[in-house]
C-alpha cells in the first residue's frame, strides 16, 4: 500500500513517526528540580522537525507552534519520551503533533506531560517554500488529528493576523530609549 500512496504523492502518517527519549539532567532543570519549559519546547521542536523532514525529504523550518500545554511536571532523573508525526499537509506546510511522556526511570510510571501542535514549511534549495506530499492517516488517532486539522489551520491564520497587528503597533523602538520608556 505504501508504494501506491507514494506514487500518488501521498505518504502514510506512520512514515513520519519519530520517537526520541532523553534523561532529564540537572542542566535541564529549574530551581524546583523540574524540566525548564523552554527546554521541553526545544525537545518538541527537534522531534517535530525530524517528522517534517521525514515526510517532505526537504529542509524544513518551524512556521508556528499552536501551543505547548504542560500537563504534568518532569523531574530531574526522569526520562522524557517524545513522539511526533505529520498529521496533515497543505501545499507547502505540514502540521506535526507531538506528545511528551515523563517516565520515572526506576518504576516505569508514565504520565503524558505535554502535547503540542507545530507547523513546518518545506524549502527548496533557494530557501523558497516547496510543495509537500499529502498525508494518509491510518489509525483512529491519526484520523482524528487529520480530520480536525483544517479547523486548527483557520485558528492559526487568525492568530497570525493578531501577531502582525501587535508587531505593527509596537514596532521596533528600543525599549531603553528615553522617549519610549514610560516605566520607573
Image: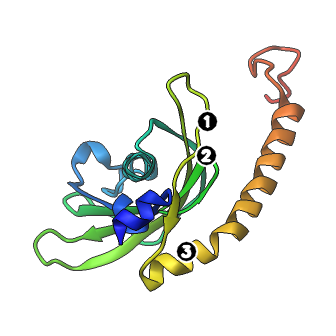
Between disc 1 and disc 3, the foreground one is 1
Dots 2, 1 in contact, CB < 8 A: yes
Q: CA distance from mark 1 to mark 3?
A: 24 Å
Q: Residue 135: where, in percent of width, then height?
A: 50, 64
Residue 94 got which mark? none
Residue located beneath label 2 in the image: 92
Q: Is residue 99 visible?
A: no
Foreground of the two, 49 or 34: 49
Image side of residue 160 versus residue 128, left or right: right
In the displayed orientation, state which residue is furthest to the bottom. Answer: 140
The residue under the point 72% across, 70% down is 151
Q: Please tell me which of labels 3 and 2 falls first in the chain.
A: 2
Foreground of the two, 169 or 13: 13
Element marked by disc 2: loop
Residue located beneath label 1 in the image: 129
Q: Residue 71: where, in percent of width, then height?
A: 46, 72
Q: Please tell me which of labels 2 and 1 falls first in the chain.
A: 2
The residue under the point 79% across, 14% down is 177
Foreground of the two, 130 or 112: 130
In the displayed orientation, state which residue is furthest to the left. Answer: 106
Figure quadrant of residue 17: bottom left
Q: CA distance from mark 3 to mark 2?
A: 18 Å
> Crowding at label 2, few (<14), some or many (≥20) Cα neighbours within 10 Å?
some
Between disc 3 and disc 2, the foreground one is 2
Residue 145 got which mark? 3
In the displayed orientation, state which residue is furthest to the top. Answer: 178
Amino acid at each position: 500500500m505504501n508504494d501506491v500512496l507514494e506514487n500518488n504523492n501521498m505518504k502514510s502518517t506512520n512514515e513520519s513517526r519519530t520517537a526520541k527519549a532523553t534523561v532529564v539532567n540537572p542542566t535541564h532543570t529549574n530551581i524546583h528540580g523540574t524540566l525548564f519549559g523552554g527546554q521541553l519546547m526545544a525537545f518538541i521542536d527537534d522531534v517535530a522537525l525530524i517528522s517534517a523532514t521525514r515526510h517532505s525529504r526537504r529542509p524544513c523550518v518551524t512556521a508556528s507552534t499552536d501551543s505547548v500545554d504542560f500537563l504534568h511536571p518532569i523531574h530531574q532523573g526522569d526520562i522524557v519520551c517524545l513522539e511526533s508525526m505529520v498529521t496533515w499537509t497543505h501545499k507547502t506546510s505540514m502540521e506535526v503533533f507531538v506528545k511528551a511522556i515523563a517516565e520515572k526511570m526506576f518504576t516505569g510510571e508514565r504520565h503524558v506531560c505535554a502535547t503540542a501542535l507545530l507547523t513546518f514549511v518545506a524549502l527548496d534549495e533557494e530557501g523558497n517554500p516547496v510543495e509537500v506530499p499529502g498525508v494518509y492517516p491510518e489509525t483512529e488517532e491519526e484520523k482524528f488529528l487529520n480530520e480536525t486539522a483544517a479547523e486548527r489551520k483557520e485558528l492559526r491564520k487568525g492568530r497570525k493576523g493578531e501577531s502582525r497587528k501587535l508587531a505593527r503597533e509596537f514596532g521596533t523602538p528600543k525599549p531603553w530609549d528615553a522617549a519610549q520608556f514610560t516605566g520607573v
